[in-house]
Amino acid sequence: MTTIVTDNCNGCRFTDCVTVCPVACFHGDENMLYIDNEVCIQCSACIPVCPVHAIFADDDIPEDKQQWIEINAERSKALPVVDEKQEPLPDAEDRKKALGY
């Protein structure tokens, strides 16, 4: 199984998801978060807490978001773990509104 973060996170970086993750599988850069599926236990606790609906389990990944499986796999390996709540990016609320949430 695969759980991924998609482009809805880009520009937001809300970290509500990391607060419910029991295994610290989230990694982040300056723009967004990614999931390391070698660590993720697919508990899905992060999915409902994401305020911009950026996280999907493998059987719910939209067709136009499939490329994020590989992006998460690659990027998560190169980035530090994010396991504590952080401030969202300065324009996160504007991005959230633009996404319709």
Image: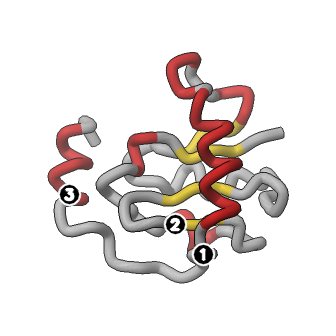
Percent from the top left, x then y, of residue 17? 54, 63
- Nearer-N-terminus badge (1/3): 1
User: Which of 67/85 is in front?
Assistant: 67
Quadrant of the snapshot with the C terminus: top left
**Crowding near pointer 3: few (<14 within 10 Å), some, many (20+)?**
some
User: Which of 99/82 is in front?
Assistant: 82
Q: What number of labels is visible?
A: 3
In the drawing, does residue 50 fall left or right of residue 76?
left
Q: Residue at x 75, y 72 (%)?
A: 22
Percent from the top left, x then y, of residue 63? 57, 17
Colour mode?
A: secondary structure
- Cβ atoms at labels 1 and 3 below 8 Å apart: no
Percent from the top left, x then y, of residue 54? 47, 44
Q: In the rendered structure, find residue 99 and report the number of the disc placed on it.
A: none
Q: How far apart are labels 1 and 2 at the CA level?
A: 6 Å
Q: How far apart are labels 1 and 3 at the CA level?
A: 24 Å
Percent from the top left, x then y, of residue 5? 55, 47
In the drawing, does residue 99 fall left or right of residue 20?
left
User: Circle 1 sits in a helix, a strand or a loop, which is it?
Assistant: loop
Q: How far apart are labels 3 and 2 at the CA level?
A: 19 Å
Q: Nearer the viewer, mark 1 or mark 3?
A: 1
- Mark 3: amino acid: Glu
Residue indicated by mark 2: 28
Q: Nearer the viewer, mark 3 or mark 2?
A: 2
- Cβ atoms at labels 1 and 2 below 8 Å apart: yes
Place residue 13 in its image quadrant.
Answer: bottom left
User: Circle 3 sits in a helix, a strand or a loop, which is it?
Assistant: helix
Residue indicated by mark 1: 80
**Crowding near pointer 2: few (<14 within 10 Å), some, many (20+)?**
some
- Nearer-N-terminus badge (1/2): 2
